[in-house]
Amino acid sequence: MITAAAMIFLAGCSGEDEGGSGESAPEVGPAEVTLSLADGSADVSPVAPLEITVTEGELAEVTLTDAAGAQLPGTVAENAESGAAVWTPEAPLAYGTQYTLTASAVNAEDEEATATSTFTTVSPASVSTPSIGPLDGQTVGVGMPIRVYFDDPVTDKAAVESNLTVTSDPTTDGVWSWFSDTEVHFRPSQYWPAHTEVRLDANLYGIHFGEGIWGEKNRTVSFSIGERHVSVADASTHQMQVYDGDQLVKTFPISAGSPDNPSYNGPHVVTEMNRDRIMDSSTYGVPVDSPDGYRTPVEYAVRLSDSGEFVHAAPWSVAQQGNTNVSHGCINMSTENARWFFEFSVPGDIVEIQGSSAGTLRSPIYDWTIPWEEWKAGSALK
C-alpha cells in the first residue's frame, strides 16, 4: 500500500512517467522573522511589548541579552489581537539600558531564519511614584473614593489612566475622573456597596507621564469597604439623622453654621478623626485676633472637609442645638452625642448636609457632589 505522502515523494523524484501528471511537490518558502522593534531603536519604554512575527514557518527560539551578553529569562505567549508572539521578561527591563533581542524560526524543511534587534530603553529626566489613598489594608466607609496624587503635572493622562486598574468584589461601574493635572479620583455612580473588597493595580513603571517624567515602579493597594454609614444633617430642622445601613439608629439635635458662616450643602466625606483638637480660624484665613477669630479646644472632632467643617462637641451651644444655627460652619453637638458619633464613624463615612443657605461643597473630596455624567466626562479615556 502506498500512502499519499509516498505518492507525492515518488512523483517529485521520478519525473514524468508515461501517463503521469508531471506534478511535483510544492516548493517550500523560507521562513521570515520580523521584530516589532527595529534594530537601533532608542528611547524605548522598558515595558514595550517585544513582538515577533513569523511567516512561512514556526518560531523556534527567542533570547534577550543585556550589553554584557547575559541572557535574561522570559516567556513567550501569543498576542490575541495581533497574532504575533510576545516575549515577556520575568523581571522588568531597566531604564537607560541596551538589550539585544534575537528570534529564530524554521520552515517545513527545518531551514532556519534569524532576526536581531539591538535597542536601548529610555533614560528618564526623572521618575515619579504617586501617592495613593486609601492605604493598603485599610477599611473605609462607603463614600471614600480612590485618590491618586502626582508630584508633577501629567500631560499624557490617557496613558496613565489606562494603567490604573481597579477591580472590586462585587463589581461596580466606577470610573476615573481628573481633578487637575496632578490628581485623579475613582468612584462608582453610587456609594460603594458595604463590604466591597477593592484593589488598585497602579502599573505605572515604564509609563511616560509627560515632559520626560516616567513611572518609577508599580504599586498595588487593596482595601475594604465597611458598614454603610450615611448621616443626614439638616440645617433647616437642626437635626441630624444617623443611619447604619438602612436603619435609622440616632437622631441628634444640632447647631449648624450660622447665617454669616453657613455650612456647605452636599455629601461630605469623613476624612479625619481627632479625639482632641484646637479649632483655629487662621487655618481658613480668619486671624485669631480678629473680631471673628477664635482658637478653641474641642473634643470628638470628625472632619468633614478641608473647608474647616467638623462634627464636634460644643457644650457652649447646647441651648441652641435643635433650634438655632450658631457655629462657624461645623455641626455642633453635645459632648455625649459627639462622643457617640465619633466612636461610630470611620474615614469614608458620609454626612449629607442639606437645608443650608450656603452653596454646594467645594473641598479636596467633593466627589459625590459631581453629577455622574459630568464625572465620567472627566475621564481621559472617553
Image: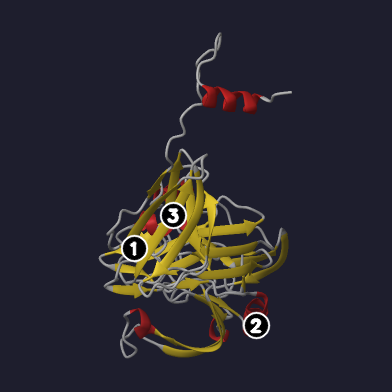
Q: How is the image coloured?
A: secondary structure
Marks 1 & 2, CB-CB < 8 Å contact: no
Q: Nearer the viewer, residue 108 or 173?
A: 108
First of labels 1, 2 by sequence position: 1
Q: Which residue is mark 3?
A: 103
Q: Is residue 193 left or right of residue 206?
A: right
> Where residue 223 sits in the image (x, y, percent)?
61, 69
Label 2, residues with CA under 10 Å away: few <14, some 14-19, many ≥20: some
Residue displayed at 30% across by 56% down: 39
Q: Which residue is mark 1?
A: 208
First of labels 1, 3 by sequence position: 3
Residue 357's disc is none
**Disc number lying in front (1 or 3):** 3
Q: Is residue 236 above or below residue 12?
A: below
First of labels 2, 3 by sequence position: 3
Amino acid type, label 2: Arg
SS at badge 2:
helix
**Disc number lying in front (1 or 2):** 1
Amino acid type, label 1: His
Q: Is residue 376 left or right of residue 344?
A: left
Q: Residue furthest top?
A: 19
Q: Which residue is mark 2?
A: 339
Q: CA distance from mark 1 to mark 2?
A: 48 Å
Label 1, residues with CA under 10 Å away: few <14, some 14-19, many ≥20: many
Residue 200 visible in rendering: yes
> Where residue 7 sits in the image (x, y, percent)?
62, 23
Amino acid type, label 3: Ala
